[in-house]
Amino acid sequence: MDKFEKLTGIAAPMPLVNIDTDMIIPKVFLKTIKRSGLGVNLFDEMRYDREGNEIADFVLNKPQYRNAEILIAGDNFGCGSSREHAPWALADFGIKAVISTSFADIFFNNCFKNGILPIVLPREQVDLLMSDAEKGQNARMTVDLEAQVITTSDGAEIPFEVDAFRKHCLLNGLDDIGLTLEKKAAIDAFEAKAAQARPWV
């Protein structure tokens, strides 16, 4: 998993509320167990018509937001089923941070495990960031995880909270496997001792 330290990029405004995981990545695309290749189908039913053509007025199809790395979302983002494909699709598209007033718990947890920083802020601050994002590609904002501060294109600073352990994992690029490998020496020592004590196993 890539480290998340400081991100400066384009933020896409998506003020819809209750965007569920089926809207993020429809169930027809859940056949894969790969984390790559899902970005093209992110928000598929909102991005494309029935013939597969892009819907021009969908935010991520607009030229100024095609390279967005931050998503400013409406309330209760990531609700619905617990599919981990949802953060996979966001990450594969290039989204590295999602900011909302609230997230569904399972989606929220899955984001951290897949290198995405979900940030919960009060409505007034989300509204401010939404307005900033609506300025387009020239209005880049910065998300500084180490300092726990979001800086708008106008220089306004908004602090945010994040769990210390999850912050550590993102800063160091540690997913569940990475965390386990941090204990490799202790695991190897235990296995060697166990092999000596029980050579028949």
Image (cartoon, rainbow, N blue to C red):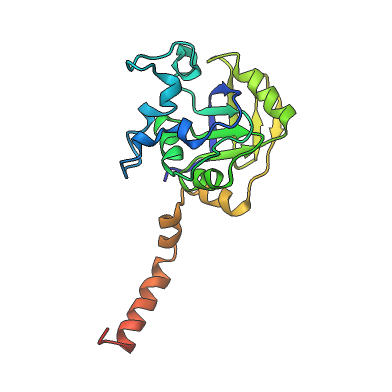
Above or below 150: residue 114 = below
In the rendered image, the quadrant that contains the C terminus is: bottom left
Q: Residue 78, how many percent across, how many down?
A: 54, 37
Residue 192 found in image quarter = bottom left
Q: Residue 141, how many percent across, how many down?
A: 59, 25
Above or below 178: residue 95 = above
Q: Residue 29, how many percent across, how many down?
A: 34, 35
Q: Residue at x 43, y 30 (%)?
A: 94
- Residue at the left extreme? 200
Q: Residue at x 32, y 45 (%)?
A: 33
Residue 63 found in image quarter = top left
Q: Nearer the viewer, residue 193 or 65?
A: 65
Above or below 43: residue 160 = below
Q: Residue at x 36, y 27 (%)?
A: 40
Q: Is residue 143 left or right of residue 189?
A: right
Q: Residue 41, how many percent across, how many down?
A: 37, 28
Q: Nearer the viewer, residue 85 or 128?
A: 85
Count of marks overlaid on the render: 0
Q: Nearer the viewer, residue 23 or 70?
A: 23
Q: Nearer the viewer, residue 175 or 185?
A: 175
